[in-house]
Image: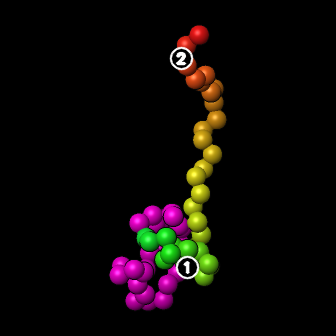
Amino acid sequence: MKIRITQAGPEGAVLYDRPWPDVGTEIDDLPTTVAAHLVASEVAEEVTVEDRPRGRKRKAGGDE
């Protein structure tokens, strides 16, 4: 689960044995349970896959 930090931590705070990241930092290497807890606690939000760039779609099966 990829998350984005939304709240600053107090001075000296740590997150999973690392200094607390800055607001806006995206993290994708935490265990899912830790990431889910941060989202539930409202100190982070889940980062979802953004829409694919819009443009022409290719047909499957090659050129015709």
Magenta residue span: 1-29
- Element under label 1? helix
**Disc 1 residue crowd, few under 14, some 14–19, many 20+, Cα 10 Å:** few
Q: Can I make out residue 47 in this image?
A: yes
Task: Give whichever of discs 2 and 1 has the lower sequence position.
Answer: 1
For image coordinates 36% across by 79% down, the residue present is 18
Where is mark 1, residue-wise? Answer: 37
Where is residue 55? Give x, y as percent: 63, 30
* Magenta residues, dominant SS class: loop
Q: For the residues marked 2 and 1, what is the alpha-carbon distance in whole angstroms? A: 45 Å
Where is residue 61? Give x, y as percent: 55, 19
* Quadrant where the image shows the C terminus: top right
Instruction: Indicate how the structure is coloured in the image.
Output: rainbow
Q: Can I make out residue 23 in this image?
A: no
Where is residue 47? Give x, y as percent: 57, 61
Q: Is residue 33 left or right of residue 52?
A: left
For image coordinates 51% across by 63% down, the residue present is 2
Q: Considering only vertical position in the picture, is 60 above or below 38?
A: above
Which of the two residues, 56 or 24, is positioned nearer the viewer here? 56
Q: Is residue 27 left or right of residue 55?
A: left
- Element under label 2? loop
Kind of residue sitting beneath label 2: Gly
Where is mark 2, residue-wise? Answer: 62
For image coordinates 58% across by 52% down, the residue present is 49
Query: Residue 28: within the magenta?
Result: yes
User: In the orientation shown, which residue stands out farthest toward the left?
Assistant: 17
